[in-house]
Image: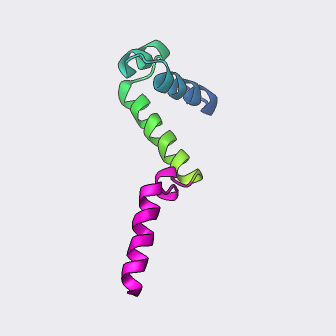
Amino acid sequence: MAQKPTPEFRAEVVRVALTSGLPRKQVAADFGVGFSTLSRWIQRDRRNLRSQQPSPILNARSPNCEKKTAFSRRSATS
């Protein structure tokens, strides 16, 4: 039975897969892991990042959004 990969190894493989520009199949083969395993690690990594940090999309307000909100408030009070 194969040894369980360490968290450091997983993090390195995910980092290379996301930043190298190489196809994920190639990265998986280079590190000796299956393509589906690499895909699962990437999904877990993204979920962990989302749960640790608030989404910048949900928290950021564009100037256009501010204008619409102000306009809606004025219209509602009129």
The answer to whether residue 40 is above or below residue 64 is above
Residue situated in front as seen by the camera: 75 or 11: 75
Query: Which residue lies most toward the bottom here?
Result: 78
- Residue 70: x and y in percent read 45, 71
Image point (51%, 53%), residue name: 55
Image point (36%, 19%), residue name: 25
Tell me the chief SS of the magenta region: helix
Image point (63%, 29%), residue name: 8
Q: How many numbered callouts?
A: 0
Residue situated in front as seen by the camera: 9 or 46: 46
Q: Quadrant of residue 11?
A: top right
The answer to whether residue 58 is above or below residue 69 is above
The answer to whether residue 26 is above or below residue 38 is above
The answer to whether residue 6 is above or below residue 51 is above
Query: Which residue lies most toward the front here?
Result: 78
In reply to whether residue 67 is colored magenta, the answer given is yes
Residues drawn in magenta: 54-78
